Image (spheres, rainbow, N blue to C red):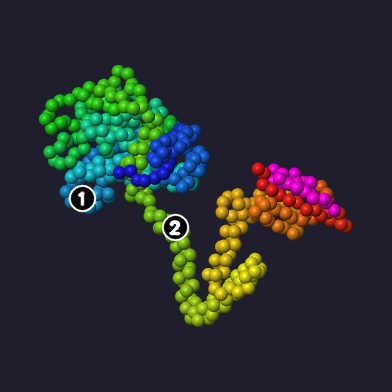
Amino acid sequence: MEESVSEFLTIRLSSRAEQPVQWLVWSPQQNEVIASGQLDNISLLDEIADYAAQRTVYALIPASDVLMTQVSIPAGSSRQLASVLPFLLEEELAQDVDNLHVHLLEKNGDLAQVAVIEHRKMEEWLAALREAGIEIKAMLPDCLCLPHFDHSYSAAEIEGQWLIRQSAVQGIAAETTWLAAWLSAQQAPIVPAVDEDDADSDADHDATEDSDTSADASEVVSLEKSSPVDDTPLTAQDIVIHHYTPAPENMPGRWQAEAPELVMQLLAQGALASKVNMLSGVYKQQPAWRKHLKPWRKVAIAAGMLVAVLAGQHFVSMQAMDKQALAYKAESERIFRQVLPQFKRVPSQSYLKRQMNSELSRLGGSSEDSGLLPWLVQLQPALAKVPQMSMQNFKYDQNRGEIRFQGVAGEFQHFEQLRTLLAENFTVEQGQLNREGNQVTGAVVLRRKS
Protein backbone atom coordinates (compact mmCIF):
# COMPACT_ATOMS: atom_id res chain seq x y z
CA MET A 1 0.00 0.00 0.00
CA GLU A 2 1.44 3.39 -0.98
CA GLU A 3 2.29 5.76 1.83
CA SER A 4 0.82 9.24 1.83
CA VAL A 5 3.49 11.67 0.61
CA SER A 6 3.19 14.98 -1.21
CA GLU A 7 6.40 14.67 -3.27
CA PHE A 8 9.36 12.31 -3.35
CA LEU A 9 12.66 12.04 -5.20
CA THR A 10 13.75 8.88 -7.05
CA ILE A 11 17.40 8.49 -8.05
CA ARG A 12 18.48 5.71 -10.44
CA LEU A 13 22.11 5.11 -9.54
CA SER A 14 24.62 4.05 -12.17
CA SER A 15 26.51 0.76 -12.30
CA ARG A 16 29.80 2.59 -12.79
CA ALA A 17 30.89 5.95 -11.38
CA GLU A 18 31.35 7.55 -14.80
CA GLN A 19 27.88 6.60 -16.10
CA PRO A 20 24.87 8.98 -16.08
CA VAL A 21 22.50 9.14 -13.10
CA GLN A 22 18.81 9.80 -13.76
CA TRP A 23 16.46 11.40 -11.23
CA LEU A 24 12.82 12.45 -10.98
CA VAL A 25 10.58 14.23 -8.45
CA TRP A 26 7.04 12.86 -8.51
CA SER A 27 3.91 14.19 -6.79
CA PRO A 28 1.27 11.50 -6.11
CA GLN A 29 -1.23 14.15 -5.03
CA GLN A 30 -0.90 16.19 -8.22
CA ASN A 31 -0.18 13.07 -10.29
CA GLU A 32 2.58 14.80 -12.21
CA VAL A 33 6.34 15.14 -12.57
CA ILE A 34 7.63 18.13 -10.58
CA ALA A 35 11.20 17.97 -11.90
CA SER A 36 13.51 15.49 -13.61
CA GLY A 37 16.91 15.30 -15.20
CA GLN A 38 20.16 13.44 -15.70
CA LEU A 39 23.57 13.93 -14.08
CA ASP A 40 26.70 13.19 -16.08
CA ASN A 41 28.08 10.96 -13.30
CA ILE A 42 27.52 9.95 -9.71
CA SER A 43 29.98 12.51 -8.31
CA LEU A 44 27.47 15.27 -9.21
CA LEU A 45 24.74 14.07 -6.82
CA ASP A 46 25.17 17.23 -4.75
CA GLU A 47 23.50 19.12 -7.62
CA ILE A 48 20.15 17.58 -6.65
CA ALA A 49 20.67 17.83 -2.88
CA ASP A 50 18.14 20.69 -2.76
CA TYR A 51 15.48 18.41 -4.28
CA ALA A 52 16.26 15.79 -1.61
CA ALA A 53 15.82 18.26 1.25
CA GLN A 54 12.44 17.83 2.96
CA ARG A 55 11.51 15.02 0.54
CA THR A 56 11.52 11.23 0.87
CA VAL A 57 14.26 9.78 -1.34
CA TYR A 58 14.33 6.35 -3.01
CA ALA A 59 17.54 5.02 -4.59
CA LEU A 60 17.25 2.52 -7.45
CA ILE A 61 20.20 0.25 -8.17
CA PRO A 62 20.83 -1.38 -11.57
CA ALA A 63 19.39 -4.88 -11.86
CA SER A 64 22.52 -5.79 -13.84
CA ASP A 65 24.47 -5.61 -10.54
CA VAL A 66 22.00 -7.76 -8.60
CA LEU A 67 21.50 -11.53 -8.61
CA MET A 68 17.93 -12.52 -7.72
CA THR A 69 17.59 -16.22 -7.04
CA GLN A 70 15.80 -18.86 -4.98
CA VAL A 71 17.25 -21.14 -2.29
CA SER A 72 15.86 -23.99 -0.19
CA ILE A 73 15.89 -23.41 3.56
CA PRO A 74 17.11 -26.38 5.65
CA ALA A 75 14.86 -27.51 8.46
CA GLY A 76 15.44 -25.61 11.69
CA SER A 77 17.22 -22.68 10.01
CA SER A 78 14.35 -20.19 9.98
CA ARG A 79 15.35 -18.42 13.19
CA GLN A 80 18.92 -17.78 11.99
CA LEU A 81 17.89 -17.30 8.35
CA ALA A 82 19.69 -13.98 7.86
CA SER A 83 23.04 -15.43 8.92
CA VAL A 84 22.49 -18.77 7.15
CA LEU A 85 21.47 -17.44 3.71
CA PRO A 86 24.97 -16.48 2.47
CA PHE A 87 26.28 -19.99 3.15
CA LEU A 88 23.31 -21.61 1.40
CA LEU A 89 24.40 -19.72 -1.73
CA GLU A 90 28.10 -20.48 -1.35
CA GLU A 91 28.17 -23.31 -3.90
CA GLU A 92 26.22 -21.27 -6.50
CA LEU A 93 28.39 -18.18 -6.33
CA ALA A 94 31.88 -17.74 -7.70
CA GLN A 95 32.74 -15.04 -5.15
CA ASP A 96 33.52 -15.24 -1.45
CA VAL A 97 30.23 -14.84 0.41
CA ASP A 98 31.97 -12.48 2.86
CA ASN A 99 32.18 -9.98 -0.02
CA LEU A 100 28.46 -10.21 -0.78
CA HIS A 101 25.36 -8.64 0.73
CA VAL A 102 22.46 -11.14 0.74
CA HIS A 103 18.99 -9.68 1.25
CA LEU A 104 15.86 -11.77 1.83
CA LEU A 105 13.12 -10.66 -0.58
CA GLU A 106 10.44 -13.21 0.25
CA LYS A 107 9.98 -16.46 2.17
CA ASN A 108 7.40 -19.07 1.24
CA GLY A 109 7.56 -22.25 3.28
CA ASP A 110 11.01 -23.76 2.86
CA LEU A 111 11.89 -21.54 -0.12
CA ALA A 112 13.51 -18.12 0.07
CA GLN A 113 13.80 -15.54 -2.70
CA VAL A 114 16.97 -13.50 -2.22
CA ALA A 115 18.86 -10.62 -3.85
CA VAL A 116 22.66 -10.72 -3.86
CA ILE A 117 25.00 -7.80 -4.49
CA GLU A 118 28.64 -6.97 -3.77
CA HIS A 119 29.40 -5.03 -0.58
CA ARG A 120 31.75 -2.92 -2.66
CA LYS A 121 28.87 -1.67 -4.80
CA MET A 122 26.64 -0.91 -1.83
CA GLU A 123 29.41 0.99 -0.07
CA GLU A 124 30.26 3.05 -3.17
CA TRP A 125 26.62 4.11 -3.70
CA LEU A 126 25.98 4.91 -0.05
CA ALA A 127 29.26 6.86 0.21
CA ALA A 128 28.33 8.96 -2.83
CA LEU A 129 24.90 9.71 -1.35
CA ARG A 130 26.39 10.63 2.04
CA GLU A 131 28.97 12.90 0.40
CA ALA A 132 26.13 14.73 -1.39
CA GLY A 133 24.19 15.06 1.87
CA ILE A 134 21.31 12.91 0.61
CA GLU A 135 19.55 10.59 3.06
CA ILE A 136 17.55 7.79 1.46
CA LYS A 137 14.56 5.88 2.79
CA ALA A 138 15.02 2.74 0.70
CA MET A 139 17.29 1.17 -1.91
CA LEU A 140 15.90 -1.40 -4.32
CA PRO A 141 16.58 -2.98 -7.75
CA ASP A 142 15.16 -0.90 -10.60
CA CYS A 143 13.52 -3.86 -12.36
CA LEU A 144 11.32 -4.55 -9.29
CA CYS A 145 9.79 -1.08 -9.70
CA LEU A 146 8.10 -2.04 -12.98
CA PRO A 147 4.39 -2.93 -12.73
CA HIS A 148 3.73 -6.48 -11.52
CA PHE A 149 1.46 -8.80 -13.55
CA ASP A 150 0.35 -12.26 -12.46
CA HIS A 151 1.63 -15.01 -14.81
CA SER A 152 3.31 -12.55 -17.21
CA TYR A 153 6.25 -10.18 -17.47
CA SER A 154 6.56 -6.39 -17.68
CA ALA A 155 9.33 -4.63 -19.57
CA ALA A 156 10.73 -1.20 -20.41
CA GLU A 157 13.89 0.00 -22.12
CA ILE A 158 16.13 2.57 -20.42
CA GLU A 159 19.67 3.64 -21.24
CA GLY A 160 20.00 0.91 -23.89
CA GLN A 161 18.97 -1.91 -21.51
CA TRP A 162 15.72 -3.78 -21.10
CA LEU A 163 14.40 -4.00 -17.54
CA ILE A 164 12.17 -7.05 -17.16
CA ARG A 165 10.10 -7.94 -14.12
CA GLN A 166 9.16 -11.61 -14.01
CA SER A 167 7.38 -11.74 -10.65
CA ALA A 168 6.94 -9.85 -7.40
CA VAL A 169 10.55 -10.63 -6.42
CA GLN A 170 12.26 -11.62 -9.66
CA GLY A 171 13.63 -9.59 -12.54
CA ILE A 172 16.66 -8.87 -14.72
CA ALA A 173 18.36 -6.22 -16.84
CA ALA A 174 19.10 -7.47 -20.36
CA GLU A 175 21.08 -6.05 -23.24
CA THR A 176 19.06 -6.05 -26.49
CA THR A 177 21.71 -8.22 -28.15
CA TRP A 178 21.04 -11.23 -25.89
CA LEU A 179 17.43 -10.53 -24.88
CA ALA A 180 16.10 -12.94 -27.54
CA ALA A 181 18.35 -15.75 -26.30
CA TRP A 182 17.24 -15.17 -22.72
CA LEU A 183 13.56 -15.16 -23.65
CA SER A 184 14.00 -18.34 -25.67
CA ALA A 185 15.35 -20.04 -22.56
CA GLN A 186 12.14 -19.27 -20.65
CA GLN A 187 9.41 -21.94 -20.63
CA ALA A 188 6.77 -20.15 -18.55
CA PRO A 189 6.21 -16.98 -16.56
CA ILE A 190 7.43 -17.24 -13.01
CA VAL A 191 4.66 -17.78 -10.48
CA PRO A 192 5.69 -17.29 -6.81
CA ALA A 193 5.33 -20.53 -4.84
CA VAL A 194 2.65 -20.48 -2.13
CA ASP A 195 2.67 -24.12 -1.03
CA GLU A 196 4.32 -27.45 -1.76
CA ASP A 197 1.89 -28.24 -4.59
CA ASP A 198 2.87 -25.15 -6.60
CA ALA A 199 5.24 -25.31 -9.54
CA ASP A 200 8.94 -25.77 -8.74
CA SER A 201 11.50 -23.32 -10.11
CA ASP A 202 15.11 -23.96 -11.06
CA ALA A 203 17.58 -21.10 -11.47
CA ASP A 204 20.77 -20.95 -13.49
CA HIS A 205 22.80 -17.80 -13.02
CA ASP A 206 25.75 -16.61 -15.06
CA ALA A 207 27.93 -13.76 -13.86
CA THR A 208 30.75 -12.24 -15.81
CA GLU A 209 33.34 -9.80 -14.52
CA ASP A 210 35.82 -7.83 -16.63
CA SER A 211 39.48 -7.43 -15.67
CA ASP A 212 40.65 -4.53 -13.44
CA THR A 213 41.88 -2.57 -16.44
CA SER A 214 38.50 -2.67 -18.18
CA ALA A 215 35.29 -0.91 -17.18
CA ASP A 216 33.73 -2.39 -14.06
CA ALA A 217 30.54 -4.12 -15.11
CA SER A 218 28.58 -7.00 -13.70
CA GLU A 219 25.62 -8.48 -15.54
CA VAL A 220 23.59 -11.17 -13.89
CA VAL A 221 21.18 -13.30 -15.85
CA SER A 222 18.56 -15.31 -14.02
CA LEU A 223 17.14 -18.07 -16.22
CA GLU A 224 13.95 -19.10 -14.47
CA LYS A 225 11.89 -22.08 -15.57
CA SER A 226 8.66 -23.44 -14.17
CA SER A 227 5.99 -25.85 -15.26
CA PRO A 228 2.26 -25.32 -14.84
CA VAL A 229 0.17 -27.54 -12.67
CA ASP A 230 -1.24 -29.50 -15.63
CA ASP A 231 2.30 -30.20 -17.03
CA THR A 232 1.33 -28.72 -20.42
CA PRO A 233 4.60 -27.68 -22.16
CA LEU A 234 4.91 -23.97 -22.78
CA THR A 235 7.34 -22.28 -25.13
CA ALA A 236 8.88 -18.82 -25.12
CA GLN A 237 6.14 -17.73 -27.55
CA ASP A 238 3.55 -18.32 -24.81
CA ILE A 239 5.09 -15.72 -22.50
CA VAL A 240 3.11 -12.46 -22.34
CA ILE A 241 5.33 -9.38 -21.97
CA HIS A 242 3.65 -6.07 -21.13
CA HIS A 243 5.91 -3.36 -22.56
CA TYR A 244 5.87 0.38 -21.86
CA THR A 245 8.44 1.40 -24.48
CA PRO A 246 8.52 0.32 -28.16
CA ALA A 247 8.99 -3.45 -28.41
CA PRO A 248 12.18 -4.77 -30.03
CA GLU A 249 11.81 -6.53 -33.36
CA ASN A 250 11.89 -10.29 -33.88
CA MET A 251 11.68 -11.18 -30.20
CA PRO A 252 10.13 -14.36 -28.75
CA GLY A 253 7.02 -13.97 -26.63
CA ARG A 254 3.71 -12.20 -27.00
CA TRP A 255 4.56 -8.52 -26.60
CA GLN A 256 1.54 -6.59 -25.40
CA ALA A 257 1.73 -2.78 -25.52
CA GLU A 258 0.65 -0.81 -22.44
CA ALA A 259 0.03 2.93 -22.24
CA PRO A 260 3.48 4.48 -22.84
CA GLU A 261 4.94 6.36 -19.89
CA LEU A 262 8.19 8.07 -18.99
CA VAL A 263 10.27 5.15 -17.68
CA MET A 264 11.64 7.08 -14.68
CA GLN A 265 8.06 8.06 -13.78
CA LEU A 266 7.05 4.40 -13.98
CA LEU A 267 9.97 3.38 -11.76
CA ALA A 268 9.29 6.18 -9.27
CA GLN A 269 5.68 5.08 -8.82
CA GLY A 270 6.80 1.48 -8.40
CA ALA A 271 9.42 2.45 -5.82
CA LEU A 272 6.80 4.20 -3.69
CA ALA A 273 4.52 1.14 -3.76
CA SER A 274 7.30 -1.43 -3.20
CA LYS A 275 8.14 -3.02 0.14
CA VAL A 276 11.59 -4.12 -1.03
CA ASN A 277 14.52 -2.41 0.72
CA MET A 278 18.10 -3.63 0.29
CA LEU A 279 19.15 -1.63 3.36
CA SER A 280 19.25 -4.65 5.62
CA GLY A 281 21.92 -6.29 7.75
CA VAL A 282 24.96 -4.03 8.11
CA TYR A 283 23.16 -1.41 5.98
CA LYS A 284 20.02 -1.31 8.10
CA GLN A 285 19.07 2.27 8.90
CA GLN A 286 18.93 3.38 12.50
CA PRO A 287 15.72 4.86 13.90
CA ALA A 288 15.65 8.65 13.54
CA TRP A 289 15.78 9.22 17.30
CA ARG A 290 18.92 7.09 17.61
CA LYS A 291 20.66 9.04 14.82
CA HIS A 292 19.98 12.32 16.60
CA LEU A 293 21.03 10.88 19.95
CA LYS A 294 24.34 9.39 18.78
CA PRO A 295 26.27 12.70 18.44
CA TRP A 296 25.26 13.56 22.01
CA ARG A 297 26.42 10.27 23.54
CA LYS A 298 29.80 11.63 24.67
CA VAL A 299 28.14 14.78 25.95
CA ALA A 300 25.70 12.69 28.00
CA ILE A 301 28.57 10.68 29.52
CA ALA A 302 30.46 13.84 30.39
CA ALA A 303 27.31 15.36 31.87
CA GLY A 304 26.77 12.28 34.02
CA MET A 305 30.33 12.46 35.34
CA LEU A 306 29.90 16.15 36.05
CA VAL A 307 26.70 15.52 38.02
CA ALA A 308 28.50 12.88 40.10
CA VAL A 309 31.39 15.24 40.85
CA LEU A 310 29.06 18.09 41.80
CA ALA A 311 26.68 15.99 43.90
CA GLY A 312 28.27 17.30 47.11
CA GLN A 313 27.83 20.87 45.95
CA HIS A 314 24.19 20.51 44.96
CA PHE A 315 22.85 22.96 47.51
CA VAL A 316 25.36 25.66 46.53
CA SER A 317 24.60 25.11 42.86
CA MET A 318 20.87 25.47 43.44
CA GLN A 319 21.44 28.79 45.19
CA ALA A 320 23.58 29.99 42.30
CA MET A 321 20.90 29.01 39.78
CA ASP A 322 18.21 30.81 41.79
CA LYS A 323 20.36 33.93 41.83
CA GLN A 324 20.94 33.63 38.10
CA ALA A 325 17.21 33.17 37.47
CA LEU A 326 16.48 36.35 39.41
CA ALA A 327 19.12 38.18 37.38
CA TYR A 328 17.55 36.97 34.13
CA LYS A 329 14.13 38.06 35.37
CA ALA A 330 15.40 41.53 36.31
CA GLU A 331 17.12 41.91 32.94
CA SER A 332 14.02 40.82 31.00
CA GLU A 333 11.91 43.35 32.95
CA ARG A 334 14.50 46.09 32.27
CA ILE A 335 14.36 45.37 28.54
CA PHE A 336 10.55 45.24 28.68
CA ARG A 337 10.30 48.70 30.30
CA GLN A 338 12.86 50.09 27.87
CA VAL A 339 10.94 48.81 24.84
CA LEU A 340 7.44 49.46 26.22
CA PRO A 341 7.75 52.34 28.70
CA GLN A 342 3.96 52.77 28.86
CA PHE A 343 3.69 49.62 31.00
CA LYS A 344 4.83 50.42 34.54
CA ARG A 345 4.07 47.13 36.30
CA VAL A 346 5.10 43.59 35.39
CA PRO A 347 2.90 41.32 37.53
CA SER A 348 4.20 38.06 35.99
CA GLN A 349 6.51 36.68 33.35
CA SER A 350 3.51 35.44 31.34
CA TYR A 351 2.18 39.02 31.31
CA LEU A 352 5.57 40.25 30.06
CA LYS A 353 5.66 37.64 27.31
CA ARG A 354 2.06 38.35 26.28
CA GLN A 355 2.65 42.10 25.96
CA MET A 356 5.89 41.59 24.01
CA ASN A 357 4.16 39.19 21.59
CA SER A 358 1.27 41.61 21.20
CA GLU A 359 3.65 44.46 20.35
CA LEU A 360 5.56 42.22 17.93
CA SER A 361 2.29 41.31 16.18
CA ARG A 362 1.31 44.95 15.98
CA LEU A 363 4.62 45.95 14.46
CA GLY A 364 4.60 42.98 12.13
CA GLY A 365 1.09 43.71 10.87
CA SER A 366 -1.67 41.29 9.88
CA SER A 367 -0.26 40.60 6.43
CA GLU A 368 3.07 40.54 4.62
CA ASP A 369 2.80 44.18 3.50
CA SER A 370 1.37 45.76 6.67
CA GLY A 371 3.04 46.71 9.93
CA LEU A 372 6.37 48.36 10.58
CA LEU A 373 8.65 45.33 10.27
CA PRO A 374 8.20 44.83 6.47
CA TRP A 375 9.11 48.49 5.99
CA LEU A 376 12.26 48.12 8.07
CA VAL A 377 13.28 45.00 6.13
CA GLN A 378 13.28 47.04 2.89
CA LEU A 379 14.71 50.17 4.50
CA GLN A 380 17.73 48.58 6.18
CA PRO A 381 19.73 47.58 3.04
CA ALA A 382 19.61 51.15 1.72
CA LEU A 383 20.72 52.65 5.05
CA ALA A 384 23.54 50.09 5.27
CA LYS A 385 24.93 51.34 1.95
CA VAL A 386 25.06 54.93 3.24
CA PRO A 387 26.71 54.56 6.68
CA GLN A 388 27.30 58.33 6.88
CA MET A 389 23.52 58.81 7.31
CA SER A 390 21.78 58.53 10.67
CA MET A 391 18.10 58.91 11.51
CA GLN A 392 16.37 61.04 14.13
CA ASN A 393 12.71 61.55 14.97
CA PHE A 394 11.58 58.35 13.23
CA LYS A 395 7.77 58.08 12.86
CA TYR A 396 5.61 55.36 11.30
CA ASP A 397 1.98 56.15 10.35
CA GLN A 398 0.15 52.94 9.44
CA ASN A 399 -3.12 54.69 8.50
CA ARG A 400 -1.39 56.94 6.00
CA GLY A 401 1.00 54.23 4.93
CA GLU A 402 4.17 56.26 5.35
CA ILE A 403 7.38 56.65 7.31
CA ARG A 404 8.86 60.04 8.25
CA PHE A 405 12.31 60.58 9.65
CA GLN A 406 14.82 63.34 10.15
CA GLY A 407 18.15 62.48 8.58
CA VAL A 408 21.60 63.69 9.58
CA ALA A 409 24.63 63.30 7.31
CA GLY A 410 28.00 64.88 6.62
CA GLU A 411 27.32 66.01 3.04
CA PHE A 412 24.41 66.78 0.71
CA GLN A 413 25.36 63.90 -1.63
CA HIS A 414 24.70 61.42 1.17
CA PHE A 415 21.02 62.42 1.08
CA GLU A 416 20.98 62.10 -2.72
CA GLN A 417 22.64 58.68 -2.54
CA LEU A 418 20.08 57.47 0.02
CA ARG A 419 17.18 58.91 -2.00
CA THR A 420 18.31 56.99 -5.12
CA LEU A 421 18.55 53.71 -3.20
CA LEU A 422 15.17 54.16 -1.49
CA ALA A 423 13.46 55.02 -4.77
CA GLU A 424 13.78 51.38 -5.84
CA ASN A 425 11.14 50.34 -3.29
CA PHE A 426 9.44 53.57 -2.13
CA THR A 427 8.05 56.87 -3.31
CA VAL A 428 10.49 59.34 -1.71
CA GLU A 429 9.71 62.93 -0.73
CA GLN A 430 12.73 64.83 0.51
CA GLY A 431 12.33 68.13 2.36
CA GLN A 432 14.68 71.10 2.35
CA LEU A 433 18.24 70.28 3.37
CA ASN A 434 20.00 72.55 5.85
CA ARG A 435 23.66 72.69 6.80
CA GLU A 436 24.44 73.35 10.44
CA GLY A 437 28.17 73.42 11.00
CA ASN A 438 29.63 70.18 9.64
CA GLN A 439 26.24 68.42 9.47
CA VAL A 440 23.44 68.40 6.90
CA THR A 441 19.89 67.72 8.11
CA GLY A 442 16.68 67.16 6.25
CA ALA A 443 13.28 65.42 6.43
CA VAL A 444 12.45 62.33 4.36
CA VAL A 445 8.97 60.85 3.74
CA LEU A 446 8.59 57.33 2.36
CA ARG A 447 5.46 55.77 0.90
CA ARG A 448 4.80 52.46 -0.79
CA LYS A 449 4.85 52.49 -4.56
CA SER A 450 1.32 51.99 -5.90
Q: Which residue, given by chain and number where applicable, does mark 1 sit on? A: 77
Viewed as shown, does residue 101 lie left or right of 371? left
Q: Earlier in the sequence, mark 2 or mark 1?
A: 1
Q: Residue at x 20, y 50 (%)?
A: 77
Q: Say whether residue 330 is left or right of residue 70.
A: right
Q: Is residue 365 above or below residue 194?
A: below
* Mark 2 nearby-residue class (10 Å; few <14, some 14–19, many ≥20): few
Q: Is residue 423 magenta?
A: yes
- Residue at 24% across, 49% down: 81
Which residue is tagged 2? Answer: 292
Residue 61 in view: no
Image location (x, y in percent) of residue 156: 34, 28
Q: Nearer the viewer, mark 2 or mark 1?
A: 2
Q: Locate the N terminus and report the quarter of the image it occupies.
A: top left
Q: Amino acid at mark 2?
A: His
Q: Quadrant of the C terminus?
A: top right
- Segment colored magenta: 414-434
The amino acid pointed to by label 1 is: Ser
- Mark 1 residue element: loop
- Is 152 placed left or right of 419 in the picture? left
Q: Residue furthest left?
A: 230
